[in-house]
Image: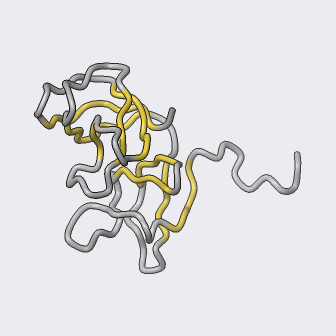
Amino acid sequence: MAKNIIFEDGDQFAANVSGVNGSGTSNSIKSGDPGVLGDLPFVALTDEDADGIATIKTNGVASLLVDAESAAVNPGDLLYYDAADTNKINNASSGNKRFGYALGSVGNGATGTIRVKIGY
């Protein structure tokens, strides 16, 4: 095996998330929070520590709160990360980063917890 491989699968690892808006009043990332590093979507597996490091997962399926802002959300629809949105994940593409795909439905103008395929 190559000696420069750091993570065998590369879908779960520690990363500096200090610049990513999380939930809560401190805006630090908490376990279960969605986020985007550059263009890389993730869900945090651990809380962000004092150095800004959290373990993140960059693929798979997570149960997330989703806002249906621009129309109803249906299975297979693209979802986006919106740092300014309280719930962070919605279907409004304008100015937001691509996050993944809906695996459930949310009515237009509603918010619901559905399964979301992380990544694209």
Q: Nearer the viewer, residue 100 or 1?
A: 100
Left or right side of 71 for 29: right
The number of numbered discs placed on residues in the rendered structure image is 0
**Where does residue 29 sit, x and y in percent of width and height?**
35, 64
**Where does residue 44 sit, x and y in percent of width and height?**
41, 54
Left or right side of 24 for 93: right
**Where does residue 19 sit, x and y in percent of width and height?**
43, 69
Image vertical order of residue 106 relative to residue 88, above or below: above
Which residue is located at x 64 percent, y 47 percent?
10
On the image, which quarter does residue 25 sit in? bottom left
Which residue is located at x 33 percent, y 27 percent?
102
On the image, which quarter does residue 72 sit in? top left
Q: Report the residue that reaches farthest toward the bottom.
A: 50
Q: Report the residue that reaches farthest toward the top.
A: 75
The N terminus sits in image quarter: top right
Q: Report the residue that reaches farthest toward the right.
A: 2
Q: How is the image coloured?
A: secondary structure
Q: Report the residue that reaches farthest toward the left.
A: 110
Q: Nearer the viewer, residue 69 or 35?
A: 69
**Where does residue 30 sit, x and y in percent of width and height?**
33, 62
Which residue is located at x 42 percent, y 40 percent?
99
Left or right side of 20 for 39: right
Which residue is located at x 87 percent, y 55 percent?
3
